[in-house]
Image: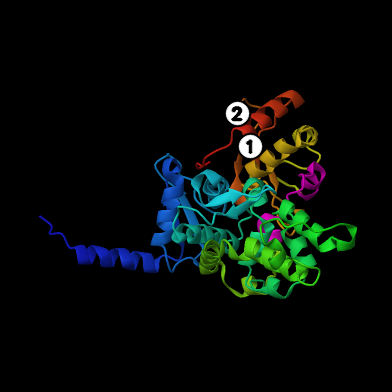
Amino acid sequence: MVPGWPLLTANQAAVSQASNPYLVLSVRRSRLVQDVVDMVLAGAGREQFPLKVRFVGSGEDGVDMGGVQKELFAVLMPRLLNPENGLFELTEGGFLWPNAASPCELSDFEAVGVLLGLAFFNGIVLDSEAAASLSPLLVRQLAFADRHRHISEAPSSLLLAVEPTFPELAAGLRQLLEWDESNGKVEDLVPGGSSIEVTDANRHEYVRRHVEFVAYEYARAQIDALRAGFMRAGDGVIYRMLSGAELEQWLCASAPEISAAELERIAQYEDEYTAEHPAVRRFWRVVHGLLPAQLRQLLAFVTASDRVPPGGYAHITFVVQRNGPDTDRLPTALTCFGRLLLPAYETDEKMCERLVTAIENASGFGLV
């Protein structure tokens, strides 16, 4: 009988982790959010190791060469950021903002920051659903250089910064700045209000302090936790060089519609396919007829991201590779390498039906 050696077991695990050059997240789809948070906490100190992701317990044996981790973030972030979880709430502008009254621990906000930092550190472009939901004002506060920039800004500049996230607040305070007392009398809003009145002399200071409280101080503890987590994973030379606007461009810039013409322009071909091959020409005829949502699905199917990266289409790898003659099989993809494995379907109708079926029902990884 082999005796139990807890110390030896612990040492073996420590040596195994120390010799692994990656931060490996092994997660179950059925328990995705909790598994990721648990493994992020367990991997403290290894956040700046290259990321590798494994989906376990679901029969997926895909090797992570970039595509699997993109799939993780595409599935994980919308669930994690869902206001029903209590971490974030929707502002009147439709953006997510940290919930200052959240029942969640600050460590939960830090874990979200770590995940955003991991995406940044590993060059993962968040999909359009997650990216579009984060408040630009919040993202700018995650930047190294812009943390205290607002303190010296004029009220008019502060209002421009907060307006997308808090449009009603900005509109009301802008009216205050533009109000001319000669156009009418001022009434007390509360008993004795005249003794604490906002006057022409102090209204700019009032607006500045009001905006700073709502946008920077009210949820300060939660924002600081997000930023601390982000820095754990994303800190480095590039991060410290980025302005808040540049970090916003990477993390939550609005995603324009995907251009079929641009995809065709940057496409490459392999295994007997060329731009003039009948099956390729058939493929592009179908693609040019897809709806905007289907074009996003196609890009995500091939690259595991439905957004064009900040550097533009030149930074997308989109290879159309022949995968046998006409068949009833669906197209498949090697997302880690940006390759669409496309059989040579013989009619436009079949090409369209097979392609749309594939891109609208794509989930999971396997070995081809």
Query: Magenta span: helix, strand or loop, mainly?
Result: helix
- Disc 1 and disc 2 in contact, CB within 8 angstroms: yes
Residue at disc 1, secondary structure: loop
Residue 145 inside the magenta-drawn segment: no
Q: Is residue 66 left or right of residue 35?
A: right
Residue 157 point in image, percent of width and height = 78, 66
| Visible residue check, residue 344 | yes
Q: Position of residue 144 (x, y in %)?
A: 62, 72
Which residues fall within the magenta stretch? 248-266
| Residue 322 visible, this orientation | no
Q: CA distance from mark 1 to mark 2?
A: 10 Å
Identify the amino acid type marked 2. Answer: Arg
Query: Horizontal and vertical percent for residue 311?
Result: 74, 59
Q: Secondary structure at mark 2?
A: loop
Q: Identify the mark nearer the N-term, 1 or 2.
A: 1
Instruction: Pick out the residue farthest to the right.
Output: 183
Nearest the viewer among 223 and 336 is: 223
Identified by mark 1, the residue type is Asn
Residue under numbered circle 2: 329
> Would you call the spot at circle 1 few (<14 residues within 10 Å), some (14-19), or many (20 or more)?
some
> Depth check: 174 or 189 in front?
189
Q: Is residue 271 above or below residue 107?
A: above
Residue topped by disc 1:
323
Residue at x 77% of width, y 46% of height:
263
> In this rendering, which labeled residue sits more in front, label 1 or label 2?
2
Q: Residue at x 50, y 58 (%)?
A: 109
